[in-house]
Image (spheres, helix red, strand yellow):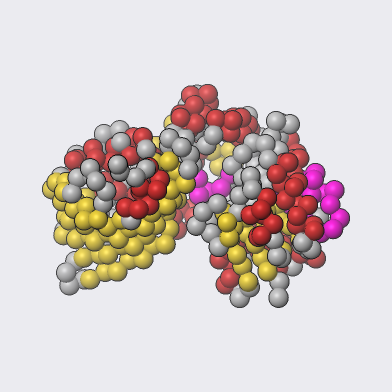
Amino acid sequence: MTNFLVLGGTGRSGSLVAKNLRDRGLAVRTAARHDADVVFDWDDPATQRAALTGVYLVAPVPWVRYAAQVSAFLDLAEAAGVRHVTYLSTYRAEQAPATMDFRAVETELASRTAFTHTILQPGWVMQNFADQHVPIIDGVITVPGGTGAEAFVDAADIAAVAVETLVHPEQHARARYTLTGPEALTFAEVAAIITEVTGRPVRYQDIDRAAWIGAVVATGFVPADYGVILDWQTSTVESGNGSRPGDDIYKVTGRHPTSLAAFARRAFRAAPVSAAPVREAPQIRDLGDFVALEPFFRIVEQGLAGLVDGGHYFDLLADDVVFEYVISVPGYPRRVAGREAVAELYRGYGANLVLHSADELAAHHDREKSVVVLEYAVHGRVVATGSAYTNRFVSVVTIQNRKVTHWRDYLDPVAVFDALGWPA
């Protein structure tokens, strides 16, 4: 039986590729540094050698220069008898500056004859607007793009194409597919579509490119040298050379690419329709201070969807909400009363930890007691060291009048100690 290894298998497209393969009853292993089926480290060839036992998806790594590591990995793949590699590259990789290795890896694959390969060149993914990549903060999309347009693509469509190339490699050998959405949109048009779908005002705000890149790097979300990729990608869109609609997704999968409106209906919750005016709670100031917690906010909003009113996480909380941290860490408050006090407690989170994803959501609703139990995991990194951080939570949430009035939190303190250091 053919085995599949998905590198970057905990990421946005990789996790979907793994799920789609499993849904077909195929043997799949995910590979990443943490929280995957197989430990895989680009800096540790021993982990790569141990992982190699079948057909593999090579996903991108968050570096600028990585061709040498990929070449060494492909040597191992060749020796292990790998039959096919699907490489997730980027739109117009052949036009990328030589200081980036997108094209170098494509050229490396083309030179190999021991196995077949497929190259995927996607445009910007729609998920950028629903996670921490280009987050909508306080109703504003802020990214340097001007009036340039991009054919944003759904990561689910990328995954669908990748799966076809892996399951039927003989049909896609040496193929290069450009993966884009059905329409080229400016960022202002993206904001207008999300506004229409959700019923909440969203607007686009242009920004100086250097200032934006500096802010992204300062959060620790990407390493400093990754700024050259951000500069190339955003300047390409702003100059009018962003991706354009194509038919490769349809040719490979037989289905049309997802529209941004359809993605928004799936990713964002519509604003509630109230029969009577509802008193608005005071706005929490400077929501940009909480960008490190965006994945946490999103998964909670998802778990409570349809049960509470409000847009942002803090809008879901009653003014007099009470938080109790039942299992926590030394020095952390056991009880916090009031929505604004909770916000102030969380405001400094990004100084120590930055989350990049949240998953494993399970929601259990006791309708008689108006209690929801949320189980979920968060993943990120430690700001000071760059090391990985993962924790799992159980949150017991009480809801009255469609607002959260009480929150009891349980986490794994050992995970916190392992990331930030053990108490003396």
In x, y percent, where is residue 367? 21, 71
**Front-most of residues 137 and 97:** 97
- Determine which quarter of the picture holds residue 239: top right
Task: From the viewer's perspective, tell me whether residue 226 is left or right of residue 193.
Answer: right
Q: Which residues are magenta?
A: 106-128
- Determine which quarter of the picture holds residue 423: top left
**Front-most of residues 424 and 139:** 424
Assess whether residue 370 is covered by the magenta stretch: no
Task: Please give the count of numbered marks on the rendered protein.
Answer: 0
Task: From the viewer's perspective, tell me whether residue 105 is left or right of residue 112.
Answer: left
Q: Is residue 363 above or below residue 67?
A: below
Q: In percent of the image, x 38 and y 52: which residue is there?
A: 415
- Determine which quarter of the picture holds residue 38: bottom right
Extreme front residue here? 424
Q: In percent of the image, x 61 and y 34: which residue is there?
A: 229
Q: In percent of the image, x 79 and y 63: which residue is there?
A: 81
Assess whether residue 109 is covered by the magenta stretch: yes
In x, y percent, where is residue 233? 61, 35
Quarter of the figure with the N terminus:
bottom right
